[in-house]
C-alpha cells in the first residue's frame, strides 16, 4: 500500500472515528485503525471496539493498493502535530507503516489487516432517511435520561421505535423518563420495530451529527443498526433486552396543572438549588393558585426561597424534586413555556413542552 | 416519674441464624460482613430471595469502589421508582471498607429507613473492627448485621454436619470429620463436596467411600496429588485425576509447573545417586516416594523428559503447534511409567 494525501483530508475523518477506540483494549488490534484503499483515489478508515464500528471514506492519491492497520491514536497525534496544509505519504513495507511529510519521517507498527474484526450482517433491516438535525433533536431530548450504570443493562441504552410515519426515542433510568417523537411522513413499514441503542453509540452520534446538515441514512436490523452521514458510517450492536413498557409509566390525567416560563423557572431553580442538600439536591415546590414558591435547605441549616411567576390550577401542593433531574430536563426543552401535571406529592409528575413538539418527560418526586 | 426505656437489642447474628431472622419479618437494612466469602455470598442470597418473596421486584445495584459518590445512595433511596416497585438496593463495597462518607451515608439511611426500599450492603473482608464502628452500630439498631466469621478448624465438622443434614443426606459416622480433614480451611471446598454427595446419592444414603472420593475431589491440593499419584506409578488414576483437573478449569501452565518441578527434583536426585554428591532436599514424608520413582529412569532419562516438558511449555505459550493437554498426558504417563519395566 502506498498513498499520498493532504493532512487535512486524513485528520478530520480520523477525528470523527477515533471515539470508539478505547484507551485500554482487550485485543491489541482494537487500538488500531484499519486503512484500506478502495479505488485509485479513495480510501476507507475503520475503527471498532467490537460493539461499535465506525468508518470514514476520504480522498487521496493511491499509488499502490493495499490494506493495513496501525495505532489509531498515534496516527491522529502525528497528523495533528504536522503543519497545516502539508502533504503526507503512507507506505506499508516490511510489516511497518512509513509516514513521511516534509522533513518528518515516522515508522509505525502494524498488525495484519485480515485480523481486524468487522461486524457481520450489518446491512439488512428497515432502511429510511431522516434529516440529521431532526434526529439530533430526538437524541438530545431523551439521551440525558438514560441510566449511567445499572444492572438493568437495557436502561443504559436508548429505545428507538420505528413506526409508519413516526420515529420515537425513549430514555429512562427508573426515576425519570424522557420521550420524544418526530413525524416521518414518508415512512411506511408493516410492523413496528423497537430496538435499544447502546449509550456509547448515542454519544458518538451526538458528537458527529452536530456538524451534519444533510440527511441521515438509518438501517435498523435484527442485531445491528447502521447510521450513515456524508462519508461516515457508524454501525452499532443493539442491546438485547426488553425495555420497560413506558406507556404504563406516563400518568394519564393530572388534576393539578402548573404553567411556567421555562427560562425564568430554570434560573430560579439554579439559584435556589445552590443551598440544596449536596447529597441529593432536593428542592421543594410549594404551589397554590395564589403563590408559587421554591425552597431549598441543607444540613447546615442554610435556606433559599424564591417566588416564581406562572399559573397554577388545582389544590395546594407541596412536592420535592431532585434539582438535577429538573435542570437536565429544562436544559433540553426549547419551548418558551413548560407545563407540569401533578396528581399528588408522591406520584410522578408529567412535564410537557408547549407548542407542537412531541416530547414529554416523567419525573418521580423525592420524599419530603 | 422518669421512664427508662431499654435500648433495642443489637442484632448481630451468625449466618446460621439468618433464615429464622428472615422468616420473622424483613428489616429495612441488612449488612453482611464477610470475612468468610462463602458465608457472605449465601447470606446475601438468602436476603435477596426473602425480599423477592415479599414483593421487592426491582433490584438496583451499586458498587462502591474507592471514590464512589455516596450521594448516589441517598439519591437512589429518596427518589421513588417510576416502575412502581419495591426495590432492593444491592450495595457492594468491594474492599469492605466504606470511607467516612460511606459510613455516614449508611448511618443516615439506618436513621430514616424507607418503606419500599430494602438496603442490602455487602462488605467482603470486613472484620470485627468494622462491626464495632459507630455507623455499623447505627445499622444494627435499624436492621440486621450478619457477621460471617472464618470457621475455626474445630467448628468445621459441625458446620459440615449441618449442611449434610440440610441436604437430607444420611452419612456414616465420621463422614463430616473426613470431609473436614480433606478440605480444612476451605469451607467452599467442603460445601462443594456436600453438593457433590447430594447429587450422587439418589435416596439420601451415602457410604464412607463416596464421601472420601467427594472430599478428595474437592481438596485444594488436587494438582500436587495428581503429581504424587504419578510418582506411585498408578497410570490409570493419574490420567483420571489429570482429566479432572482439566474439567475443573485448571491452567495447563500451573500443572506443567508442578510437573516440571518434580522432574527437576527426580533428575537431580538420580544424578546424585549415579555420580554421588548432595541429594536435593525433600520433605521426609515424600522422600520414599520420590526415591522409588527416581530409580525408574537414569538421570539422563529424566532430563530428556524435562526437555519434553519444555516442548509442551512452548505449545501452551502458543510458540508451537499442538494440544497442551495431549502433551501433559504424555508427560504424566511417562512419569508414572517405568521404561525398564516395559523392557522386561
Image: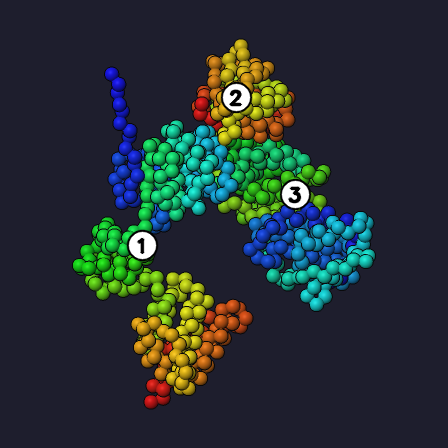
Residue at figure coordinates x 53%, y 10% from the top left:
A290
Disc number at residue B187? 1
Q: Residue furthest front?
A: B278
- Of badges 1 and 2, the one in the foreground is 2
Name the one closer to the observer, A120 or A129: A120
Q: Nearer the viewer, residue B42 or B304?
A: B304
Q: Quadrant of the C terminus of chain A?
A: top left
Residue A155 in the image: state x and y as whole percent.
50, 39
Mark carried by residue B143: none
Nearer the observer: mark 3 or 2; the answer is 2
Say above or below: B248 vs B85.
Answer: below
First in sequence, mark 3 or 2: give its number.
3
Q: Farthest left residue?
A: B173
| Dot 2: element | loop
State the residue position of label 3.
A217
Q: Are marks 3 and 2 on the same chain?
A: yes
Q: Position of residue A139 (x, y in %)?
A: 60, 36
Q: Residue at x 32, y 43 (%)?
A: B147
User: Is any atom of residue A152 visible in this view?
Assistant: no
Tags 1 and 3 touching, CB below 8 Å:
no
Q: Give the labeled residue for mark 2.
A: A302
The subunit letter for the residue under badge 3 reads A
Amino acid at each position: 500500500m502506498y498513498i499520498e494525501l493532504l493532512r487535512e483530508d486524513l485528520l478530520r475523518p480520523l477525528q470523527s472515528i477515533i471515539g470508539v477506540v478505547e484507551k485500554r483494549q482487550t485485543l491489541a488490534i482494537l487500538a488500531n485503525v484499519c486503512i484500506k484503499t478502495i479505488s485509485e483515489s479513495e480510501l476507507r478508515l475503520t475503527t471498532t471496539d467490537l460493539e461499535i464500528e465506525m468508518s470514514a471514506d476520504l480522498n487521496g492519491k493511491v499509488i499502490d493498493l493495499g490494506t493495513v492497520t496501525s495505532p489509531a491514536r498515534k496516527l491522529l497525534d502525528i497528523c495533528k502535530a504536522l503543519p497545516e496544509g502539508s502533504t503526507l505519504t503512507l507506505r506499508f513495507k516490511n510489516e511497518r507503516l512509513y509516514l513521511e511529510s516534509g522533513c518528518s519521517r515516522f515508522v509505525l507498527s502494524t498488525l495484519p489487516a485480515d485480523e481486524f474484526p468487522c461486524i457481520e450482517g450489518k446491512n439488512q433491516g428497515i432502511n429510511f432517511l431522516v434529516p440529521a438535525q431532526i434526529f439530533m433533536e430526538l437524541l438530545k431530548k431523551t439521551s440525558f435520561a438514560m441510566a449511567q450504570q445499572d444492572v438493568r443493562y437495557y436502561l443504559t441504552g436508548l429505545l428507538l421505535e420505528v413506526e409508519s410515519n413516526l420515529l420515537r426515542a425513549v430514555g429512562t433510568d427508573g426515576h425519570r423518563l424522557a420521550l420524544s417523537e418526530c413525524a416521518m411522513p414518508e415512512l411506511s413499514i408493516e410492523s413496528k420495530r423497537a430496538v435499544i441503542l447502546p449509550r456509547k453509540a448515542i454519544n458518538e452520534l451526538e458528537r458527529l451529527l452536530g456538524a451534519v446538515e444533510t440527511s441521515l441514512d438509518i438501517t435498523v436490523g435484527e442485531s445491528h443498526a447502521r447510521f450513515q452521514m456524508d462519508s461516515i458510517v457508524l454501525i452499532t450492536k443493539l442491546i438485547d433486552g426488553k425495555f420497560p413498557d413506558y406507556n404504563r409509566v406516563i400518568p394519564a390525567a393530572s388534576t393539578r396543572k402548573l404553567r411556567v416560563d421555562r427560562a425564568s423557572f430554570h434560573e430560579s431553580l439554579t439559584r435556589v438549588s445552590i443551598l440544596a442538600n449536596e447529597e441529593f439536591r432536593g428542592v421543594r415546590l410549594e404551589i397554590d393558585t395564589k403563590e408559587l414558591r421554591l425552597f431549598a435547605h441543607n444540613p447546615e441549616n442554610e435556606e433559599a426561597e424564591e417566588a416564581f411567576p406562572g399559573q397554577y390550577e388545582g389544590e395546594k401542593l407541596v412536592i420535592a424534586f431532585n434539582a438535577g433531574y429538573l435542570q437536565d430536563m429544562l436544559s433540553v426543552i426549547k419551548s418558551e413555556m413548560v407545563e407540569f401535571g401533578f396528581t399528588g406529592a408522591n406520584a410522578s409528575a408529567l412535564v410537557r413542552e408547549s407548542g407542537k413538539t412531541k416530547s414529554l418527560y416523567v419525573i418521580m418526586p423525592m420524599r419530603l | 416519674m422518669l421512664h427508662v426505656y431499654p435500648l433495642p437489642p443489637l442484632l448481630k447474628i451468625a449466618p446460621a441464624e439468618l433464615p429464622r431472622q428472615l422468616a420473622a419479618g424483613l428489616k429495612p437494612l441488612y449488612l453482611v460482613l464477610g470475612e468468610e466469602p462463602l458465608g457472605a455470598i449465601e447470606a446475601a442470597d438468602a436476603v435477596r430471595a426473602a425480599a423477592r418473596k415479599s414483593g421487592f421486584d426491582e433490584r438496583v445495584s451499586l458498587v462502591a469502589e474507592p471514590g464512589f459518590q455516596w450521594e448516589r445512595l441517598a439519591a437512589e433511596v429518596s427518589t421513588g421508582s417510576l416502575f412502581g416497585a419495591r426495590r432492593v438496593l444491592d450495595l457492594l463495597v468491594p474492599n469492605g471498607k466504606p470511607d467516612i462518607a460511606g459510613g455516614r451515608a449508611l448511618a443516615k439511611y439506618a436513621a430514616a429507613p424507607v418503606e419500599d426500599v430494602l438496603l442490602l450492603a455487602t462488605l467482603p473482608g470486613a472484620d470485627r473492627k468494622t462491626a464495632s464502628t459507630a455507623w455499623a452500630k447505627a445499622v444494627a439498631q435499624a436492621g440486621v448485621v450478619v457477621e460471617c466469621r472464618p470457621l475455626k478448624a474445630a467448628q468445621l465438622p459441625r458446620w459440615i454436619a449441618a449442611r449434610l443434614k440440610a441436604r437430607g443426606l444420611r452419612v456414616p459416622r465420621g463422614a463430616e470429620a473426613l470431609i473436614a480433614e480433606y478440605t480444612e480451611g476451605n469451607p467452599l471446598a467442603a460445601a462443594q463436596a456436600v453438593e457433590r454427595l447430594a447429587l450422587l446419592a439418589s435416596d439420601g444414603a451415602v457410604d464412607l467411600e463416596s464421601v472420601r472420593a467427594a472430599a478428595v475431589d474437592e481438596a485444594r491440593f488436587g494438582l500436587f496429588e495428581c503429581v504424587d499419584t504419578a510418582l506411585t506409578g498408578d497410570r490409570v488414576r493419574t490420567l483420571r485425576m489429570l482429566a479432572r483437573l482439566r474439567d475443573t478449569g485448571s491452567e495447563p501452565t500451573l500443572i506443567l509447573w508442578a510437573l516440571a518441578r518434580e522432574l527437576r527434583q527426580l533428575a537431580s536426585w538420580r544424578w546424585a545417586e549415579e555420580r554421588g554428591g548432595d541429594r536435593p532436599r525433600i520433605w521426609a514424608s515424600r522422600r520414599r516416594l520420590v526415591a522409588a520413582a527416581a530409580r525408574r529412569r537414569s538421570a539422563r532419562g529424566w532430563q530428556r523428559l524435562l526437555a519434553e516438558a519444555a516442548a509442551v511449555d512452548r505449545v501452551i505459550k502458543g510458540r508451537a503447534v499442538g494440544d497442551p493437554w495431549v502433551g501433559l498426558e504424555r508427560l504424566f504417563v511417562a512419569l508414572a511409567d517405568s521404561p525398564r519395566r516395559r523392557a522386561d
